[in-house]
Image (cartoon, rainbow, N blue to C red):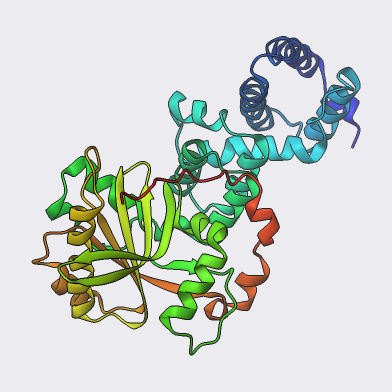
């Protein structure tokens, strides 16, 4: 390709304009490094798409542009041919079918470039991508945690538990509570036999509590296992007890290694009543129950919850041996998943 024939005065004028914009971005970058850089990337992506559409420069444009920008700004990374292709792909991903609003662009430029590359490379559509962008912003996910959530299909699992939240909680609380749960929960960090019982599963989850909290999601603070509550002359024990810092309520989690049965909902309802009476204090919202089981019939679960007035969600769980080999091999390591996972605040139980 004889680039001197194709890259004429129009290109040189555009290159000069980009150089000015790069210098302006460099000045502002001392205060807002990521946002300013990604705003520059977005404008460059738009220009690259338009120039390739309006001219005959073709793919040679990116090769030429990469060399010129790298030569002019040797201290700046990001002008490699590969990254310029990412910049173009990034812009096209969000604008190919229809333009997006400035609010969406603002969200894109608030998360690191590596996060943006992961999202556009792994998500199938804009709605899925926006879901992970918003959750990254809300939860301060590291890139490894983000990739883990995408590969574990959080978008399709979020808010899919069977529950009665809409009928027993105010709308603002029910929407948030529903989004806090997912179906199924994936415990890919556990290596257990297929014949495990509730006690083994409980032990394993507690022994891997940081990974467990990562799968539960932001807001869950672990308070204890086999937590005793006194009712009358008898003492009962809750499998796992949490406090949710965003819902401002206790969360009782019961584990069942078999199929869901209607009586499970009744027992969990009893525990919620006990926690509300014994542990809940002023400012706490009604306690929520989460029942995790290996399998559940959707209609049976809905029937079981239909007349219960305490908020309960029912979800399934999947262990690592239940996952396809191809999917398991694509997971990041546990060490990678723990990077960026902040310590979860604890709330003391009332004596």
For image coordinates 30% across by 42% down, the residue present is 248
For image coordinates 54% across by 52% down, the residue present is 123
Image-quadrant location for residue 4: top right
Left or right of 173, for residue 79: right
Whole-percent x, y for residue 159 in the image: 33, 56
> Viewer-proximal residue, 301 or 347?
347
Whole-percent x, y for residue 344 in the image: 50, 46
For image coordinates 43% across by 50% down, the residue present is 221
Q: Residue furthest left?
A: 307
Left or right of 329, for residue 304: left
Q: Is residue 255 above or below residue 112?
A: below
> Viewer-proximal residue, 188 or 108?
188
Q: Is residue 260 above or below residue 176?
A: below
For image coordinates 80% across by 30% down, the residue present is 79
Left or right of 117, for residue 283: left
Q: Is residue 183 above or below residue 105?
A: below
Q: Is residue 30 above or below residue 55?
A: above
Whole-percent x, y for residue 328 in the image: 63, 71
């Amino acid at each position: 390709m004889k680039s001197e024939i194709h890259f004429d005065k129009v290109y040189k004028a555009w290159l000069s304009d980009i150089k000015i914009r790069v210098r302006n971005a460099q000045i502002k970058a001392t205060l807002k490094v990521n946002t300013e850089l990604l705003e520059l990337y977005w404008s460059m992506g738009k220009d690259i798409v338009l120039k390739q559409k309006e001219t005959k420069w073709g793919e040679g444009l990116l090769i030429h542009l990469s060399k010129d920008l790298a030569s002019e700004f040797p201290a700046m990374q990001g002008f490699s041919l590969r990254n310029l292709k990412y910049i173009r792909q990034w812009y096209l991903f969000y604008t190919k079918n229809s333009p997006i609003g400035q609010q969406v662009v603002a969200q894109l430029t608030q998360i690191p470039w590596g996060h943006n590359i992961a999202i556009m490379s792994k998500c199938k559509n804009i709605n899925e991508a926006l879901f992970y962008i918003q959750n990254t912003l809300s939860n301060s996910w590291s890139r490894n945690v983000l990739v883990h959530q995408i590969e574990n299909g959080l978008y399709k699992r979020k808010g899919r538990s069977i529950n009665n939240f809409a009928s027993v909680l105010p709308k603002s609380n029910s929407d948030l509570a529903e989004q806090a749960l997912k179906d199924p929960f994936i415990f890919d960090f556990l290596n257990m036999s297929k014949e495990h019982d509730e006690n083994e599963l409980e032990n394993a989850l507690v022994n891997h509590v940081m990974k467990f909290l990562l799968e539960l999601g932001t807001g869950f603070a672990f308070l204890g296992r086999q937590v005793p509550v006194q009712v009358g002359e008898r003492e009962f024990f809750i499998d796992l007890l949490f406090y949710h810092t965003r819902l401002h309520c206790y969360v009782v989690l019961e584990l069942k290694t078999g199929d869901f049965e209607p009586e499970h909902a009744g027992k969990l309802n009893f525990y919620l009543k006990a926690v509300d009476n014994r542990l809940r204090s002023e400012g706490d919202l009604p306690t929520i129950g989460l029942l995790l089981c290996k399998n559940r019939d959707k209609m049976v679960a809905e029937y079981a919850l239909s007349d219960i007035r305490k908020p309960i969600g029912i979800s399934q769980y999947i262990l690592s041996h239940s996952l396809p080999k191809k999917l398991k091999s694509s997971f990041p390591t546990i060490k990678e998943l723990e990077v960026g996972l902040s310590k979860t605040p604890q709330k003391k139980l009332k004596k």
